[in-house]
Every structure is written in C-alpha cells, then in structure tokens.
Image: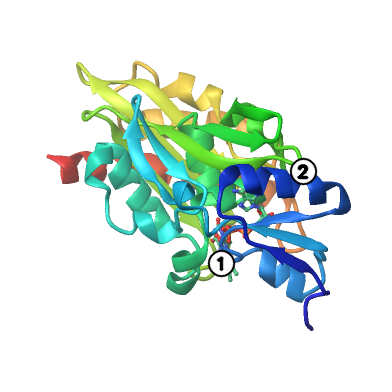
Amino acid sequence: MKAAPFTLHRPKTLDEAAALLADVAGDGGLVLAGGQSLVPMMALRVAYPPHLVDINAIDSLSRIEVADGALSIGATVRHAAFHRPLPQAGVLGRLLSTVVRHIAHYPIRQRGTFCGSLAHADPASEWCLAAATLDATMMLKSTSGTRSVPAAEYLEGAMETARAPDEILIEARVPLLPDSARFGFYEFNRRAGDFALGIALATYDLADGVMRNVRIGLGGIEEKARRIAVAEAALDGQPPGEGAFAAAADAAMADVDAMEDASTSQEYRRDLAGVVLRRALKASMASAVAAQ
Ligand SMILES: Cc1cc2nc3c(=O)[nH]c(=O)nc-3n(C[C@H](O)[C@H](O)[C@H](O)COP(=O)(O)OP(=O)(O)OC[C@H]3O[C@@H](n4cnc5c(N)ncnc54)[C@H](O)[C@@H]3O)c2cc1C
C-alpha cells in the first residue's frame, strides 16, 4: 500500500517549525523525525496525516551535550549516536550504549531518533524505559513557549504522552550517573530486533557494601514504562546478591498491572517482570566488574 497524499513542510528554524505545527496540528498534522515508526504506519494507512512538519533541517536539534548535570539529547539525535559510549556522559554513556543495541536493527537505528521514541511512546520502547528509570525531563515547545515535563508525568500510557498536538519534543535531558553507579539491563524478546516482551533497567550506588539510590524500571510489562518503587525499597540498604534480587523480583511481580495480548497472558507477563528484573540485577554485578 502507499501513503495517503500529504503536504511536506521542511522548516529551517525551531520557531518556523512551531508556527507550522500550530497551523496544521488541528487537522492531524504531525512532526516527522526519523520516520521509522511514522512512515511504516503511513504506508499501511494506519496513520494518514495531511501535513508533515519535517524537523530534520533544523541544525540546533542535532545537538547532544552535557549541561547542568544532564545529557541533553536534541530531537534529531539518532539511536546510532549511542552505539559507542559517549565519553562525556561517563557511566550514563556506557548504560545508553548497552541499551541501544536492543533497539530494532542497525539500519533503523541510523534514522530513528531518541526523542522520536519518546514521542511515539511504545510501552516496550527501550528509551522510554531509560527515561522513566533515570527521571529524564522532556522539553516541549509550541508557539506559546517551552515547558519541561518529568518523565513520570510525560509518559501517560500506551502511545500516550502529556505532549499536546502542537508541541514539539525538542530535547530530552537525562541526568548523569555518578562514577560509582552500577547498572544492569535485560531484555526478553522472541527474535533479535523485535519489540521486547519485557525489559528491566536497574541502577544503584554501592556504599559500605549495600545498595543505595536504587532505581528500578520495567518496560513492556504495563502500558507504560515506570519505576517500581516497591522493588527499589526491597533493595535499598541490602548487599547485592541473589537473596535481595529475588525479593525485589517478587515485590515487582506483586505490584505490576501486566498487559495481555493475543500471544501472552497477564500471568505470563507478570512472571516475565520478575525474570527480566532478576537478570538485569545480575547483570549489574558484571557492570561493576567491567568498570573496575
Ligand atoms: C522493524 C522495526 C523494529 C523496531 N524495533 C524497535 C524496538 O525494538 N524498540 C524501539 O524502541 N523502537 C523500535 N522501532 C521504532 C524505532 O525505534 C523508531 O525510530 C522510533 O519509535 C520513532 O523514532 P523516529 O525518529 O523514527 O520517529 P517518527 O517515526 O518520525 O515519529 C514517530 C511518532 O512520533 C512523533 N514525533 C517524532 N519526533 C517527535 C518530536 N521531536 N516531537 C513531537 N513529535 C514527534 C511523530 O509525529 C510520530 O507520531 C522499530 C521500528 C521498526 C520499523
């Protein structure tokens, strides 16, 4: 099938893009970033926006830099920018380069964008999981100005965010991690490159042999990625190891409101929450070894 007819706008500045989107959003006009989700949906006629505001010619949106203790990732920064750890981002750079390998396939990662994933908000998006777990901030711009929204408020549900139709997600700010931070990531899917059935991300500091500042996130299990406070509480103050990891996994399984679909039941996905979390925590032990 071919996409329905549409008008392509290619603004050169952010103000021009915001003004264009303000004009066309009411009619269903959309932002075009990497096109790796939107274009297939248009080709299948699941989406048929009459206008596309292509943001790829706006130079300022391709910036990726460390500022004010966070990694600022502009709207046209591709997934592939994270293939190698960004040295200026320290532990966070290593974490993002571990996660990115699980997103789609190599060619898709050359075009698809970090912010496009956050705008699309698939429940199994790896970047949505990273944003939720690390408490990233989204910068949203419209003709009325720019506002910042924390990830926990920004991600509202499956393909649903707090972004208004006339707002452009211009940047995501992901807080840096301390040099001492450990992290672990685990993803389960049926074939490499598929969207995940379940993903977990864990980070913590090790102080006097026990875990502190614990962050646990799950994706692909519920309708949106989120931090799992009960699992964090089960780990805080405990030494890393199988006992604590199993307690956190049990707490997470009891807490999640798992999705079901044609191929997986709620019980299956709830179980998977525990499995991916335990494996992510186990991987965190290896990340510490790798960092030494
Ligand atoms: C075969 C295949 C496998 C995939 N596997 C995975 C996977 O495992 N994990 C994963 O996370 N993703 C996966 N994807 C999706 C891919 O990562 C996309 O790149 C990503 O979801 C969207 O980013 P994009 O830049 O391509 O956005 P686009 O496709 O251009 O846009 C997607 C949506 O977000 C909106 N949008 C995009 N950017 C902005 C912005 N800055 N401001 C406002 N709105 C915006 C668009 O209007 C559109 O509605 C896969 C895609 C394919 C085709």
- Closer to the N terminus: mark 2 or mark 1? 2
**Tag 2 residue:** 22
Question: For the N terminus, which image quadrant?
Answer: bottom right
Left or right of residue 221, residue 290 in this image: left
Camera-nearest residue between 109 and 28 = 28
Proximity of marks 2 and 1: CB atoms separated by less than 8 Å: no
Look at 35% across and 24% down and name the residue there.
68
- Mark 2 belongs to which amino acid? Ala
Quadrant location, ligand no. 1:
bottom right
Residue at mark 1: C-beta within 8 A of ligand 1 = yes
Look at 52% across and 48% down and name the residue there.
75
Left or right of residue 247, residue 272 in this image: right
In this rendering, the answer to whether 277 lies above or below 268 is above
Disc 1 element: loop
Image disc number at residue 194: 1
Q: Is residue 122 visible?
A: no
Q: Position of residue 48 (x, y in %)?
A: 82, 66
